[in-house]
């Protein structure tokens, strides 16, 4: 199934519950603008290489377009389109004043030097600088991109438009970024997992958690949940996966990853398992925090966790989602579960625009408040309408965007 078909299924379900007209559904399910650009660079070897870059601006009814920039060799327009729509519903669910967008470059960043990545990023900005900016569209990091690249984006954009730190978020703290942005998505995943456990009447200490992916999101989620006395019983990344029923030592995992180029392979503090065994681990909460589309109709039946928290974007395919709904597995959907990142990006944008800095405590406090309110609204809606948390989250997001569209007018 294409990524856009998957998000469309959830959108249609929510639009049905909201009784949206066909014309409104068409408006909300198509992107406002899609661009594809050529990015030619000279490689370090002197050879010419040409990459393709995309930016899809899905909807700006509630504020400027907002969404990450992904560098991955499999990025294509369909992917970017689906992720852009997800951003529209995500910013609306947490009620921050943005729309949704996504961008990407079809390149394997691991096969490029830092200088090559800088040239790609700056050429991409040259190609699209008229289409984004603080009041228009604000990119941020995603898979394969990092804070340094956001600094290059700000710097290159400034060559055309002058000093504009709010044109991009996720920047280094020493270069107009904010403390608390890097941890925000994982922290939000952790905090929302605790809220969900609380609502389900489960005891938090000792809760057994399995996490797929040990990058930005997975590491901070693991640390947050371990600090809350949960037991991290399984963790895996692209290189390896490990299990320990008594709980893995998260600080040791972090140390190992730091000393081994971010990879878990070779970790000695747990039993080695396969990636599929990780997804099927005997645990209370499964947190897929790596790639999209990893839980399918083929492996959903093997998943034993009664609770799934979608830290990655789109990790559960719709057929698997139907299996989970039918058997009563509780699933916290991506558009709420991983919204901490874009929420902290909003804090960065606000501070950049005010030329003012908050402290880390204020960032965490505001993040917890916004995610907590969104969680309660989604939970209440799911209860009152007797729908899944995913459908409730989509109803809240799609409903807000539809309302803003009517209020703003389309003429
Ligand atoms: P990352 O690149 O920092 O980490 C990704 C992790 O996934 C790595 O540990 C990698 O080894 C692992 N991985 C890759 N392929 C795998 C496989 N086949 N099996 C198991 N593990 C595999 O990325 P991230 O920023 O942590 O993002 C993870 C997910 O969260 C993505 O879907 C991303 O779109 C989503 N997300 C991230 C943010 C953010 O702020 N970083 C915000 C919202 C959503």
Image (cartoon, helix red, strand yellow):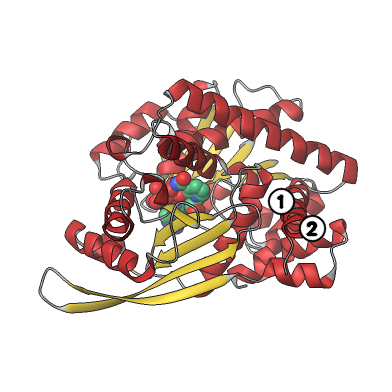
Q: Residue at x 59, y 48 (%)?
A: 280
The quadrant of the image that shows the N terminus is bottom right
Q: In the displayed structure, would residue 312 be above or below residue 194?
A: below
- For disc 2, the neighbor class at 10 Å (few under 14, some 14 to 19, many from 20) is many
Q: Residue at x 29, y 40 (%)?
A: 175
x, y percentage for residue 247? 49, 28
Residue annotated with mark 2:
14
- For disc 1, the neighbor class at 10 Å (few under 14, some 14 to 19, many from 20) is many
Q: How many marks?
A: 2
Q: Are marks 1 and 2 in contact (CB under 8 Å)?
A: yes
x, y percentage for residue 2? 60, 73
Asked if one can make out residue 121 in the rendered structure from this viewpoint, the answer is yes
x, y percentage for residue 71? 37, 62
x, y percentage for residue 393? 73, 48
The quadrant of the image that shows the C terminus is bottom right
Residue annotated with mark 1:
397
Residue 146 is marked as none
Asked if one can make out residue 333 in the rendered structure from this viewpoint, the answer is no
Q: In the displayed structure, would residue 324 be above or below residue 26?
A: above
């Amino acid at each position: 199934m294409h990524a856009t078909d998957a998000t469309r299924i959830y959108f249609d379900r929510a639009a049905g519950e909201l009784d949206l007209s066909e014309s409104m559904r068409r408006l909300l399910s198509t992107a406002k603008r899609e661009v594809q650009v050529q990015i030619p660079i000279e490689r370090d070897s002197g050879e010419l290489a040409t990459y393709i870059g995309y930016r899809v601006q899905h909807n700006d009814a509630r504020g400027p377009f907002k969404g990450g920039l992904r560098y991955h060799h499999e990025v294509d327009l369909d992917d970017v389109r689906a992720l852009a729509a997800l951003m529209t519903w995500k910013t609306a669910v947490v009620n921050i004043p943005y729309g949704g967008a996504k961008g990407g470059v079809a390149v394997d960043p691991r096969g490029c030097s830092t200088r090559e990545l800088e040239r790609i990023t700056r050429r991409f900005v040259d190609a699209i600088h008229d289409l984004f900016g603080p009041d228009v569209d604000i990119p941020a990091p995603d898979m394969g991109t990092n804070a340094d690249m956001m600094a290059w984006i700000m710097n290159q954009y400034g060559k055309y438009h002058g000093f504009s730190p709010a044109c991009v978020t996720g920047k280094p703290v020493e270069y107009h970024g904010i403390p608390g942005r890097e941890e925000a998505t994982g922290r939000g995943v952790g905090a929302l997992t605790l809220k969900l456990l609380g609502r389900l009447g489960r005891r938090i200490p000792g809760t057994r958690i399995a996490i797929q992916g040990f990058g930005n999101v997975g590491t901070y989620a693991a640390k947050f949940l371990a600090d809350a006395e949960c037991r991290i019983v399984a963790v895996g990344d692209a290189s390896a996966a490990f299990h320990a029923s008594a709980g893995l030592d998260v600080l040791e995992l972090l140390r190992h990853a730091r000393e081994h180029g971010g990879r878990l392979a070779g970790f000695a503090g747990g039993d080695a398992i396969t990636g599929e065994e990780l997804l099927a681990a005997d645990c209370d909460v499964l947190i897929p925090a790596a790639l999209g589309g990893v839980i399918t109709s083929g492996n959903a039946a093997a998943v034993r966790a009664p609770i799934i928290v979608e830290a990655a974007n789109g990790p559960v395919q719709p057929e698997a989602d139907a299996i989970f709904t039918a058997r009563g597995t509780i699933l916290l959907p991506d558009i709420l579960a991983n919204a901490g990142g874009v929420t902290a990006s909003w804090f960065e944008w606000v501070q950049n625009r005010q030329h003012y800095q908050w402290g880390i405590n204020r960032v965490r406090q505001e993040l917890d408040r916004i995610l907590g309110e969104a969680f309660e609204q989604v939970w209440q809606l799911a209860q009152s309408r007797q729908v899944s948390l995913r459908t409730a989250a989509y109803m809240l997001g799609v409903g807000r965007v539809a309302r803003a569209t009517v209020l703003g007018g389309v003429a």
